[in-house]
Image (cartoon, grey):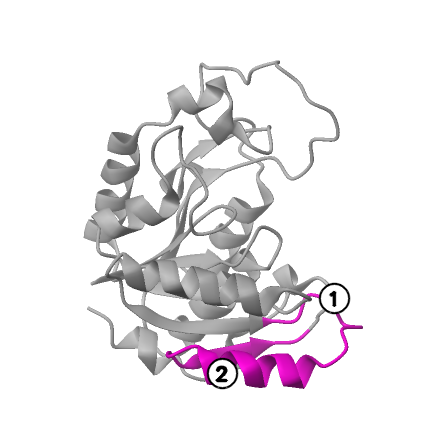
Amino acid sequence: MSVFFVTGTDTGVGKTIASRAIMQAMQDAGKQIVGYKPIATGQDEPVYTDILDDASSDYGKEDNRDVLILMDSTKENVNYRDVNSYTFSHSVPMITIESERIQQAKLDQDLARLAQSYENVLVEGSFGWLSLINRELTFGDWAASHQMPVVLVVGIKEGCVNHALLTVQSIEKMGLKLVGWIANRINPGLSHYAEILASLERKIDAPLLGKIPYIHRPEKQELGHFITEIERLTSLD
């Protein structure tokens, strides 16, 4: 059994798409795997609002895009509440009063249930490595409390080298294993793509697990073949 954590250099860098690619690659290699999105948030919030979500359910309308992609990417028969602990309509509930609803004990219990039921669990964080879960706890803190190996998704864009190296530094400082990183091309018109990749490969002391090109509607595609070093993940225990 293995549980590992997928983080990103920022929000919008393709963590869910990379997670889909990893899950498909591991299943192609004969491994059982499910995804888990502890906290799912709204994608857009054009104006500030203090209107709270309905507190009667932790799962909102059960329609978060990231959670639905993770469900679609596994061969296992899971429902929305199996693979998510909290869904919010707000984009950043972790820094509002709604953060008081997010309990680490629930995250721990839901993760333990999945780990006991499935061979492999891919845990996808929200935003970046040190983004808040609630007003006290970061995703990095929580991953460290479970000693999860980490996969870093780098959205290839201007400034990504700085973001990637700072994230790697923090992961290593917390004593966690960086299994490897994935390059996700989120800007098809970016100049010097090859040079940026070469710089990252030279500076990150962990293997490049795969390169995902810019693809139309990748959430509907087979992406497993873009993960070329899948044995780094299939050998985790």
* Amino acid bearing label 2: Glu
Question: In terms of secondary structure, where does tag 2 sit?
Answer: helix
Determine which residue is flagged by label 2: 201
Question: In terms of secondary structure, where does tag 1 sit?
Answer: loop
User: For residue 90, which quarter of the picture?
Assistant: top right
Determine which residue is flagged by label 1: 216
Q: CA distance from mark 1 to mark 2?
A: 26 Å
* Amino acid bearing label 1: His
Image vertical order of residue 69 relative to residue 215, above or below: above
Q: Percent position (x, y) of residue 160?
A: 60, 66
Say if residue 68 shows up in the picture.
yes
Q: Which residues are magenta?
A: 184-213
Q: Percent position (x, y) of residue 198?
A: 57, 86
Say if residue 227 shows up in the picture.
no
Q: Which mark is first along the chain, 2 or 1?
A: 2
Q: Percent position (x, y) of residue 40?
A: 50, 39
